[in-house]
Image (cartoon, coloured by chain):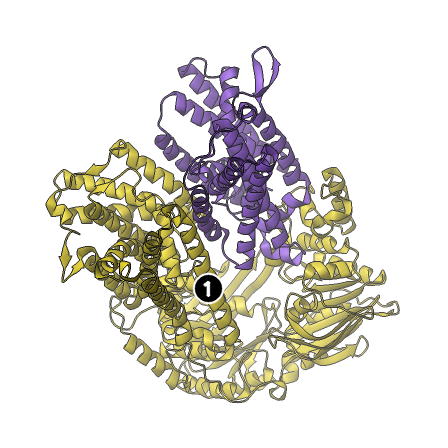
Chain colours: A yellow, B purple
């Protein structure tokens, strides 16, 4: 075995806020070895992986790669070395196919980025999957796979890229026994081929079976490291939990009173936990321990009605089925959520306001509350919990994590609940604050509350719990009374063993969801056909004549070119409502240049460049300024229109040369020229969106921002590109508009954005980003044009047009929502 | 207290800017600050101000309403049709208020029921309400309003003494500002709206109903549109389906200048009122120095973007409440 380790880590430290996640960790990973990494939740394993893969920058420490000092400052450099990681929750682009997901994850395209070869992409994706023994089709959408299947696919992708150091964070958590066994066989083969593998797992049997070397982490440090022979299960457990208890266990506990809340055969509708039975009694603290993925938080959320569940909940002898936290609160059941930052606090709001949220009405009259009284009540609570703060009106985010947690606890205590469910009450707070929070929890129980403390911190559960229940893979795997509970006993119950793991059956074959995904476009075409048929019956030859239909197509053409651009912006998750004024401005500028003698071809070029510049300007202001594009583009409506009027003085731009008018005038093979131009644009757009890496990245960024970041896709660059392309298309539309209508008037393009957005949304572009197709935009544009034509033929006053545009946008967005909902349910 | 000092900082800066604008224009335009002409001018800003108050709640809750101009026109044309059909004035005015309220509730219901971004819903209803206003009226303005109604809007005022008078519309606006301030800063509704905008997940865990809050605030915006429609009709002695076109720009600009974060979580009704004074004075000054409406819009648009970016960066730096 090589004497120089592949990656040597020296003195790595990383702190988040006050919590030290990694504390001078030094480790070696060697080529051709499987390195098992174990430790409790929060021991620092995930942070270690994120530092080594460039996702997080360490505060201190050095990396030696093949004995040479290297900097890993970003995902790119880590990849360059051949370091890959499969995260605990695989990050995927749900709407894209597996093969494409693999392409984005790899960061490069097969062959030419300007002409993606889908067959090759699928073939190489399929090859990567098959090399890993996975038989599902590479064209299947990622959404249709189970979590375990995605995990395997992602590992397959990393392997296919010949990584030299591979981190796997809990890869078997979501796998069946058979899938796990297949994975292990591959890992052994990779090891033989010289890859260094770091395997993070709670399943100690796996680690002891596969690893050549084992490291135990505890509280951000390396607790023990050595070759496998030095460890057995009991030593691993000992090293994982072997900590100084720090705080004495309260000796005398009052007798538990009557049962307040009982769960019987309580199961999650989504399968996160099953047949859980629990009993919470007055004056008693129940500790619920479980590892990641055991279903702890899901259970807590289900109890207060945040997740659908089956089974019985009985509160003081009556059935308890709350629709949500508000109703649970009224019944006296309160959940203090796990993630303080995202689920607990209102960060920039005053401490006072954070404390009084759920009981504001107690001191209000008809909704009005006296602030002085609120301040006094809030201060009482903050003081009772020994919170350190300068001013009750300071933003809560300026307090330390421990003090924030005390105030959040105080928020709920003040509601005087009968049952308190505390999910990870001391996560990320320092030791001193932790002891104070614990004291408060005991005090609560002493006052007769029923308390459930959910924690992945073993010592916490043991210190607090009068009883300890252990959740493992969604089931209660053990119940201990205080005197029976030992660290090793509880840990043993929490660690899954092969026989406890549910599933273990056949490898699920994903259904083909392509038809379902295409359903959105099909529905547009379907609606179009129905509409055309209805109009043919109603209006006869008024509608169904070649002349009228060609006229409709010509009208659709101009809208469709701008809508093709809007599709880019919508796919990437933005919106640009300034395009009507943008059309007026670019039309006036390029049109005037044409009148002054610029050749028609150059005028088109000028329009495109001007539009692209305006679009890029919108994007820059929005994303640099960190404000939603709606504000910038709302201002753009008035700024661009005002600039246009300044430039033209309110006069129309017209009197174009015949050569300029010839851009769109006349027909080619019987169809108006604009129709041909639009067809050309849409062919180009289809190529760009489907066949280029830059096009596909729009879908990636719009589909999942987080996954895009992990894939190293530049968010700002991609968004800028989308807005610039949209602007360019609008500029093109503007010049063609001038040529087609012969003039650009001061109000040209007013309200155009509505038609364009309607066409794009009807054509299947999701307003929330990630979806939309070139062909759908064409269908949407034609549909809008047909509706306008129908209004005229049916002699409905044009004044009603706005009503139809508005209803079309709402209906299309609602339809989209509905189809998504259906698909989401099918997947589950 | 630090945060309160910070809170008043913004208002103080706004007040200084307003004084500076007033001083600058009165130097170049003699008689610019003449109380009589200012009082007269203030009529023009009543509708914008009325709608900007509930818009403060909406933007603070992380939402937006682009449909306000169209909804005002729709309420105006519904009451116009009622008037033309011979209904008495109280019924006509109730019709305007109810139409506005219903429109606002429709916006909120669509946002919740379809889980759509407020921006998309209100962009659609921007077209929808305007289309209804034109369609219902056949694009015909409704005139022939009784003198008692139009006098009240155009010349009617509370005469204090001498030449001093305050238009009724302005009195209504001042009342609405006071009520809005109390609702936003001293009532659960304003608190809930801000909390929803600051952290919707935490709001859900804390038992705040997003639907109820949104129905209330978008409904209030609709009511303000209905009230604005009445005042507008009285002022111009005509109901016109093209009225209040582009109202949303000034309303949103006023709210953002007043210090409400466009991403939600923070806002101030007194700030919105100062924003109204600032924008009103600026537009008045530009009017009397013969700057065209379009050129003014360029300035207002740029101002909106700059202040919105400033608010966002300021808020991130200072984390103010």
Q: Nearer the viewer, residue A22 or B197?
A: B197
Q: Residue at left 42%, top 43%?
A: B134
Please name the residue that numbered disc 1 is placed on.
A815
Whether residue A71 is visible here, answered yes or no, is no
Q: Taking A308 as reference, is A347 above or below it?
A: above
Q: Residue A345: percent from the left, percent from the top?
A: 63, 53
Q: Could you tell whether A414 is left or right of A547 in the image?
A: right
Whether residue B76 is visible here, answered yes or no, is yes
Q: Could you tell whether A292 is left or right of A637 in the image?
A: right
At mark 1, the secondary structure is helix
Q: Taking A312 as reference, is A381 above or below it?
A: above
**Chain name for mark 1:** A
Q: Residue at left 20%, top 48%?
A: A740
Q: Quarter holding the C terminus of chain B?
A: top right
Q: Residue A499: percent from the left, percent from the top?
A: 62, 89
Q: Quarter holding the N terminus of chain B?
A: top right
Q: Residue A515: percent from the left, percent from the top?
A: 39, 76
Q: Residue at left 42%, top 74%?
A: A516
Q: Could you tell whether A645 is left or right of B53 in the image?
A: left
Are there few (<14), some (14-19), or many (20+) residues within 10 Å of tag 1? Answer: some
């Amino acid at each position: 075995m090589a004497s120089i380790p592949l990656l040597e880590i020296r003195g790595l430290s990383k702190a988040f806020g006050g919590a030290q996640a990694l504390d001078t960790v030094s480790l070696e990973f060697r080529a051709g070895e499987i390195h098992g990494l174990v430790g409790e939740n929060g021991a620092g394993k995930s942070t270690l992986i994120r530092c080594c893969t460039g996702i997080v920058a360490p505060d201190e420490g050095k990396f030696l790669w093949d004995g040479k000092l290297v900097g890993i400052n970003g995902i790119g450099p880590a990849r360059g070395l051949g370091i890959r990681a499969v995260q605990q929750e695989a990050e995927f682009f749900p709407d894209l196919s597996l093969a494409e997901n693999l392409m984005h994850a790899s960061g490069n395209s097969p062959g030419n980025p300007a002409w993606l070869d889908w067959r090759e992409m699928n073939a190489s994706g399929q090859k990567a999957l098959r090399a890993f023994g996975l038989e599902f089709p590479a064209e299947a959408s990622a959404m249709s796979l189970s979590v375990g299947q995605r995990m395997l696919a992602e590992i397959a992708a990393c392997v296919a890229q010949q990584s030299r150091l591979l981190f796997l964070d809990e890869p078997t958590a979501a796998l069946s026994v058979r899938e796990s066994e297949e994975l292990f066989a591959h890992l052994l083969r990779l090891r033989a081929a010289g890859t260094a593998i770091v395997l993070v797992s709670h399943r100690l049997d796996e680690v002891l079976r596969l690893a050549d070397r084992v490291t135990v982490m505890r509280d951000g440090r390396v607790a023990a490291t050595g070759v496998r022979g030095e460890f057995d299960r009991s030593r691993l457990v000992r090293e994982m939990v072997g900590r100084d208890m720090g705080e004495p266990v309260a000796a005398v506990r009052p007798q538990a009173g009557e049962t307040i809340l009982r769960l019987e055969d309580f199961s999650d509708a989504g399968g996160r936990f099953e047949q859980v039975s629990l009993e919470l009694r007055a004056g008693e603290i129940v500790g619920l321990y479980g590892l990641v993925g055991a279903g702890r938080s899901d259970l807590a959320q289900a109890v207060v009605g945040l997740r659908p569940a089956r089974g019985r909940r009985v509160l003081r002898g009556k059935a308890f089925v709350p629709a949500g936290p508000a109703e649970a609160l009224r019944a006296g059941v309160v959940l203090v959520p796990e993630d303080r930052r995202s689920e607990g606090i209102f960060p920039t709001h005053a401490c006072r306001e954070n404390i009084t949220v759920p009981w504001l009405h107690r001191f209000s009259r008809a909704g009005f509350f006296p602030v002085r009284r609120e301040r006094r009540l809030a201060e009482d609570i903050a003081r009772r919990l020994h919170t350190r703060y300068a001013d009750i009106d300071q933003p809560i985010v300026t307090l330390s994590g421990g003090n924030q947690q005390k105030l959040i606890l105080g928020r709920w205590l003040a509601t005087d609940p009968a049952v308190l469910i505390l999910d990870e009450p001391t996560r990320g707070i320092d030791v001193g604050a932790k002891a104070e929070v614990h004291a408060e929890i005991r005090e609560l129980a002493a006052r007769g509350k029923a308390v459930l403390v959910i924690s992945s911190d073993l010592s916490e559960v043991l210190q607090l719990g009068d009883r300890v229940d252990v959740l493992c893979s969604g089931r209660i795997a053990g119940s201990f009374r205080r005197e029976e509970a030992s660290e090793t006993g509880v840990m043993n119950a929490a660690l899954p063993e092969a026989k406890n793991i549910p599933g273990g059956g056949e490898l699920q074959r994903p259904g083909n969801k392509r038809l379902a995904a295409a359903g959105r476009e099909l529905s547009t075409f379907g609606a179009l056909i129905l509409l055309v048929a209805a109009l043919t019956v109603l209006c006869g030859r008024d509608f169904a004549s070649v002349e009228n239909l060609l006229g409709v197509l010509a009208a659709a053409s101009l809208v469709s070119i701008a809508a093709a651009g809007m599709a880019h912006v919508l796919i990437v998750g933005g919106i640009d409502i300034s395009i009507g004024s943008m059309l007026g401005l670019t039309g006036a500028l390029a049109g005037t240049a044409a009148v002054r003698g610029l050749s028609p071809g150059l005028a088109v070029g000028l329009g495109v460049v001007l539009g692209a510049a305006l679009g890029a300007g919108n994007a820059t202001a929005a994303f640099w300024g960190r404000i939603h594009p709606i504000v910038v583009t709302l201002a753009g409506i008035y700024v661009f229109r005002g600039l246009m009027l300044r430039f033209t003085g309110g006069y129309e731009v017209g009197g174009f040369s015949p050569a300029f008018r010839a851009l769109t005038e006349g027909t080619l093979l019987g169809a108006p020229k604009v129709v041909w131009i639009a067809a050309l644009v849409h062919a180009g757009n289809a190529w760009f969106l489907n066949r280029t890496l830059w096009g596909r990245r729009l879908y990636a960024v719009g589909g999942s921002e987080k996954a895009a970041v992990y894939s190293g896709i530049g968010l700002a660059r991609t968004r800028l590109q989308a807005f610039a392309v949209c602007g360019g298309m609008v500029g093109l539309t503007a010049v063609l508009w001038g040529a087609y209508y012969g003039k650009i008037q001061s109000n040209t393009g007013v309200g155009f954005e509505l038609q364009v957005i309607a066409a794009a949304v009807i054509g299947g572009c999701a307003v929330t980003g990630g979806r939309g197709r070139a062909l759908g935009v064409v269908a949407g544009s034609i549909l809008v044009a047909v509706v306008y034509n129908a209004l005229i033929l049916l002699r409905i006053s044009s004044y009603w047009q706005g009503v139809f545009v508005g209803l079309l946008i709402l209906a299309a967005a609602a339809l989209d929502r509905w189809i998504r909902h259906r698909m989401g349910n099918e997947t589950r | 207290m630090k945060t309160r000092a910070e809170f008043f900082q913004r208002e103080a800066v706004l007040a200084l800017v307003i004084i500076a604008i007033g001083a600058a224009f009165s130097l170049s335009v003699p008689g610019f600050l003449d109380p009589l002409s200012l009082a007269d001018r203030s009529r023009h800003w009543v509708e914008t101000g009325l709608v900007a108050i509930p818009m403060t709640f909406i933007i603070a809750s992380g939402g937006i309403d682009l449909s306000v101009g169209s909804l005002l026109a729709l309420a105006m044309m519904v009451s116009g049709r009622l008037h033309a059909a011979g209904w008495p004035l109280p019924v006509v005015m109730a019709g305007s208020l109810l139409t506005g309220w219903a429109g606002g509730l429709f916006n909120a219901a669509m946002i919740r029921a379809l889980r759509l971004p407020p921006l998309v819903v209100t962009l659609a209803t921007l077209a929808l309400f305007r289309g209804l206003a034109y369609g219902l009226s056949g694009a015909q303005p409704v005139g022939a309003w009784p003198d008692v109604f139009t006098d009240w809007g155009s010349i009617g005022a509370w005469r204090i003494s001498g030449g001093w008078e305050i238009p009724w519309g302005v009195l209504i606006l001042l009342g609405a500002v006071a009520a809005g301030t109390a609702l936003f800063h001293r009532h659960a509704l304003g608190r809930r709206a801000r909390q929803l905008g600051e952290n919707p997940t935490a709001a859900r865990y804390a038992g705040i109903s997003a639907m109820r809050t949104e129905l209330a605030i978008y409904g209030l915006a609709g009511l303000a549109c209905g009230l604005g429609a009445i005042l507008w009709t009285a002022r111009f002695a005509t109901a016109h389906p093209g009225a209040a076109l582009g109202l949303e720009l000034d309303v949103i600009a006023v709210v953002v200048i007043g210090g409400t974060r466009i991403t939600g979580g923070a806002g101030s009704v007194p700030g919105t009122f100062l924003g109204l004074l600032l924008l009103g004075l600026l537009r008045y000054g530009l009017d009397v120095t013969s700057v065209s409406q379009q050129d003014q819009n360029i300035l207002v648009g740029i101002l909106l973007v700059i202040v919105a970016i400033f608010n966002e960066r300021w808020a991130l730096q200072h984390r103010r409440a």
